[in-house]
Amino acid sequence: MSASYIDLPSGGSPIAFSFAEACKSLETENDAVRRRGSRRGLWMAVAVYVAFAVPDQLLIPDVAPVTIAARFVVATLALFMFELLLLAKAKTIWLDVTCAAALVVGYVGWLCPAIATRDTAAMSYYMIFGAIFMMGANLFFSFRFLLSVITSGLVLCAFFVTIEAFFPSSPAYKLAFGLFYVSCFTFTSFVNWRLTIERRSVLLNAAEARHQHWEASERGKSLLELSHTDYLTGIGNRRALDRRLDECWLAWKNDHRNFSVFLIDVDFFKRFNDRYGHQEGDRCLTVIAKALKAVVEPSGGMIGRYGGEEFIVVIPVESQRMALSLAERIRTEVEFLAIGHDERPDDRAIVSVSVGVAFTREPAGEKVERIVREADLALYNAKASGRNCIRCFDPLLPRPDDNAGKLVPLLAAAIDRNLVSLVYQPIFDVHGKARAVEALMRLRLPNGTAVSPKVFIPVAEQTGAILELGRWAIETACRDILMTDRMATVSVNVSPIQLRSPGLAASVAEILRECGVSGSRLALEVTEGLDMDMRSEVFKCIADLRNLGVEIWLDDFGSGFAGLSWLRAIDFNTVKVDRTFLHDCSNPRGLMMLQDMISLIRNRGNTILVEGVETAAQLSLLRELQIDRVQGYHLGMPVSAELLQAA
Ligand code: C2E
Ligand code: MG
Ligand code: MG
């Protein structure tokens, strides 16, 4: 209900209260009208009263100087008093009393000197005008009923006292004029009474109408509020946020006031719902919404639910740096809530959020939707980077493949439905002896079509399915290759997302223990090509894996932008040079590049592996360069574990 109900007088119902309020406000408005009316009325009445100096002069000339003087004195006093009270902002009732007194005094003030006239015949007719004072009290001014009756009653009394005691008059005159005065008093009082009732009912009707109008507008307001509120969390809904977005967009286009949009997604929320039930899921969203609101609103932002487990924030900020620091506060705030989630595939065990941030950037473009789309792309990248992180939109970042959507449900059930498998590609030393195999994942659609890892691995990374697929790959490779002693070493590719999830080292330890094989026979290939920031948790994970004896190889060296930083930060057992460097060796510049790279790695003391050997010429070149390990189609195709021995 509206705030006006807060100050309800005790015992009053909300409706009665606001109806009384409506009456009061109408009375206040009426009061102002009445004050203006009384003033106008008094000035008019005084003008007529003074103008009657002329009939005084004609009918009772002997006393006319006195009656005229009396008229002027009463008129001046009445106006003076009235204007003074008006200036002093006196209550309306005092203005009315002044007018009423002016009527009575005006009548008596004229009557007293007039009855002393010698021209009693003229005076006896002239006295009929006393009735006008009664009419004035009852009909001309709009006094309260009681005040009108008292005023006209006093005029009536003054008349009777005069004809009874001071003015010589016959019984017939007394009867006729007395009856006339009484009838006049009765009729005007009656009409006044009817008018008072009428006025009251008009006021009540107007108050009722005003009250109904107020109720309707209150209802309208709450409906409007409801239509902009998310039914579950109580924060704004999409419609409210769209409106705010439009406002910020216009402020940016017209006044260059920057703003930022965050899209916030609750990580692995579907699993949360499946594990704890929808009621708990709703509660989780409500708690998160409340926490986010507490962060965003004090900074002038607005938060809304964008649908499902996704929230949106629209916030005016001056710089991208400020936007990012606020987004980071949002992320940590949710972590701080520590809502348990033991169904996460990454062993984090609490609910977290991924945040995509977009900041206004030139050119403005025509549509506000662009900034939301950019926040969405940033969110996509945050998810692809292992979740529980923030990412800012960058036009250079990878964009989601629209066809990838079809793979999402397949990847979630790929292991159960036997859609994934591993093939193994041998790795040789330059003398042609097989030293290891690399496990490569394969995915087949239910209709048998093969999907390239370059397509499905990024999707699995984005949806988080990579965590289960990656664990499955390590376990399967250990069983296929190490338990059966098909090869001394197996290398398995791991995604940066696996490295960031705290459970990787523990699950590798468990696999090694279950398979009963030594950690030194397993190598994990870490690619430098992907966006992989050097978080301390990654280093910790690598250190834990090292403690298990597991080898860490750097894959696709030279293909990304952070290879050298990685090389400096981590002591890799083997560095795999990206195949493009070998393929570029057909020209002297390419050859020099490969040679430089090799000496760089050699100087650091890492084992060198060159991948992508497709021809005998390439192999002999690598022999010349005394490369430690080689891999490629020319030496061995990726094959299933069963075919490996025969190959
Ligand atoms: P990668 O780890 O660099 O794997 C080597 C890729 O090069 C494989 O492609 C392999 O079939 C291909 N290859 C091998 N020899 C030659 C050659 O002589 N010439 C050419 N042109 N290509 C050769 P594939 O199997 O399509 O895998 C592509 C990428 O997908 C892998 O690159 C790796 O980054 C990723 N991937 C594959 N399996 C897994 C996995 O189990 N987990 C993760 N996280 N990533 C995987
Ligand atoms: Mg690899
Ligand atoms: Mg590679």
Image: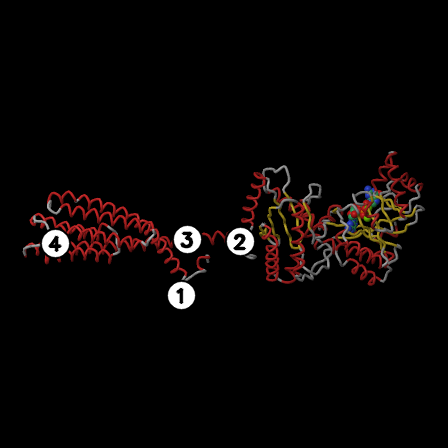
Alpha carbons under labels 4 and 1: distance apart: 52 Å
Q: Secondary structure at mark 1?
A: loop
Residue underneath mark 1: 11
Q: Nearer the viewer, residue 510 or 598?
A: 598
Residue underneath mark 2: 229
Kindly check if marks 2 and 3 are in contact, taking CB atoms under 8 A apart as contact. Answer: no
Image point (32%, 54%), residue name: 91
Q: Looking at the picture, does residue 505 appear above or below residue 39?
A: below
Tell me if mark 3 has few (under 14), some (14-19) or many (20+) residues whose alpha carbon lies within 10 angstroms of its own: few
Is label 3's Cβ within 8 Å of ligand 1? no
On the picture, is 410 further left or further right than 165? right
Residue 618 x %, y %: 89, 39
Q: Earlier in the sequence, mark 4 or mark 2?
A: 4
Residue 369 x %, y %: 59, 43
Alpha carbons under labels 1 and 2: distance apart: 33 Å
Residue underneath mark 4: 180
Residue underneath mark 3: 216
On the picture, is 59 further left or further right than 35? left
Amino acid at dot 4: Phe
